[in-house]
Image (spheres, helix red, strand yellow):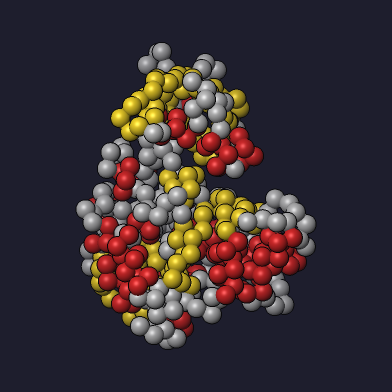
């Protein structure tokens, strides 16, 4: 099966996307976006504020609680050359985002560097004003320094230091950084993006891109859904810059899938086990990637044992030939047993899972998502859930003036075999 998947031609997941169809700014109201619904094999339009009308009554929605960090830093050398440093993931704290953000000077990160050739071995510096924690109006002067420790093919290791050293790196980034808008918006971040490029349920800092399907939700809509029997759980997947990387190879077998970290509370694992028979709907591809990664990591624990180690899911692991697969409940129970054996309240792992056609979707039964770039791994994920129907969906969206990508409109996909079981 692996070779069959690896031979998938990415050109088969291409479609024409005019630049004017890419939403450059969000709508003034989050839930005013259009909603494309695929249900009972039919495609029709609505608005996101009406999504309750189309959700099965037993739906369990899964939110990604990650929070976008102000990961783009702009330095200017004495010569006048501009150097941009884009923070990808921490080295400090053994890769633990919360430890890295709470750390005091210094802190090391894997970063992308813009205008890299103009930066030799000199130390860069920028003066900033840091907001006091207990006083919104009071600012404290600080200086942020950056030194390149190592240069690799795909990233540089940057050591950040700052004065006063007792400030946390989270405070430094908040003052010095910019919201890293997707490159296809072709514009600089504005003050409004600080609030609108975050979901209303964002909690845990670590992403360089928003889980954009969640941008359509308001607190009022969430409370309305809860009042109508829809339940919620939260996971965390910190979205990396690799999410924007198109597949440049002819087949997906030559594409190295980016890795992202996940964190899931024990109570969420227990809830998923309890509700496996319900209509579990991830809100966004990041939530879906987390859920399906949990299944395959659970299988990995079943096959390889429960010894404590760094858990990482390889992109091709789900496509290995196996005589049979455990149920979602059995696989998730393996994770729960692992957590209990090692006295863990939060399950941490990393995933390079590529969800492509032929991948067994084991937990998600539907999906709320936005429209994705042509020839992207996210479009492969959509196809894994709804098959070639994605072509009809995207053509319908193009024909009916839907807005595309991060700040664009939304979709609710309930595959036919699932939809026949739902009751609205």
Answer left or right for 213 relative to 66: left
**329 over 105 or under it: above or below:** below
Looking at the image, which residue is at 23% across and 56% down? Answer: 29
In this view of the protein, can residue 116 be seen by the observer? yes
Residue 331 drawn at (x, y percent): 66, 70
Q: Nearer the viewer, residue 240 or 244?
A: 240
Residue 71 placement: quadrant: top left
Residue 177 placement: quadrant: top left
Residue found farthest to the top: 78
Residue 353 drawn at (x, y percent): 58, 59
Residue 276 placement: quadrant: bottom right
Q: Which corner quadrant holds the C terminus? A: bottom left
Answer left or right for 237 relative to 187: right
Looking at the image, which residue is at 66% across and 70% down? Answer: 333
In this view of the protein, can residue 360 be seen by the observer? no
Looking at the image, which residue is at 23% across and 62% down? Answer: 32
Looking at the image, which residue is at 55% across and 25% down? Answer: 105
Residue 190 drawn at (x, y percent): 28, 38
Q: Which corner quadrant holds the N terminus? A: bottom right
């Amino acid at each position: 099966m692996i070779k069959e998947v690896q031979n998938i031609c990415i050109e088969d997941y291409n479609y024409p996307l005019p630049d004017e169809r890419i939403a450059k700014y969000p709508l003034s109201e989050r839930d005013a976006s259009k909603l494309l619904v695929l249900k009972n094999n039919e495609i029709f339009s609505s608005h996101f504020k009406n999504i309750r009308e189309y959700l099965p009554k037993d739906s369990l929605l899964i939110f990604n609680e990650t929070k976008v960090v102000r990961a783009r830093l702009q330095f200017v050398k004495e010569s006048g050359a501009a150097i941009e440093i884009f923070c990808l993931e921490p080295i400090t704290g053994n890769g633990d985002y919360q430890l890295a953000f709470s750390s005091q000077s210094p802190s090391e990160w894997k970063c992308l560097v813009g205008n890299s050739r103009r930066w030799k071995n000199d130390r860069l510096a920028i003066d900033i004003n840091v907001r006091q924690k207990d006083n919104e109006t009071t600012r404290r002067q600080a200086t942020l320094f950056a030194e390149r420790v190592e240069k690799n093919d795909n990233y540089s290791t940057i050591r950040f230091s700052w004065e006063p050293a007792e400030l946390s790196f989270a405070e430094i980034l908040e003052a010095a950084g910019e919201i890293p808008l997707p490159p296809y918006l072709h514009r600089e971040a504005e003050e409004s993006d600080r609030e609108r490029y975050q979901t209303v349920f964002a909690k845990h800092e670590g992403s360089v891109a928003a889980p954009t399907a969640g941008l359509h939700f308001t607190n009022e809509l969430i409370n309305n859904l809860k009042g109508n029997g829809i339940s919620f759980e939260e996971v965390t997947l910190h979205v990396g810059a690799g999410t924007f990387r198109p597949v440049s190879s002819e087949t997906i077998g030559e594409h190295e899938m980016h890795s992202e970290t996940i964190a899931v509370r024990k109570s969420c694992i227990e809830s998923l086990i309890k509700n496996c028979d319900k209509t579990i709907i991830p809100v966004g591809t990041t939530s879906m990637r987390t859920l399906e990664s949990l299944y395959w990591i659970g299988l990995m624990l079943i096959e390889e044992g429960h010894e404590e180690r760094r858990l990482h899911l390889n992109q091709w692991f789900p496509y290995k030939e196996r005589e049979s697969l455990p149920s979602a409940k059995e696989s998730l129970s393996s994770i729960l047993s692992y957590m209990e054996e090692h006295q863990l309240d939060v399950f941490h792992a990393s995933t390079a899972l590529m969800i492509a056609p032929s991948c067994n979707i084991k937990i998600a039964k539907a999906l709320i998502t936005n429209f994705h770039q042509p020839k992207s791994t996210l479009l492969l994920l959509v196809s894994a859930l709804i098959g070639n129907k994605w072509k009809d969906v995207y053509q319908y969206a193009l024909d009916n003036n839907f807005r595309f990508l991060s700040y664009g409109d939304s979709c609710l996909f309930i595959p036919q075999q699932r939809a026949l079981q739902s009751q609205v």
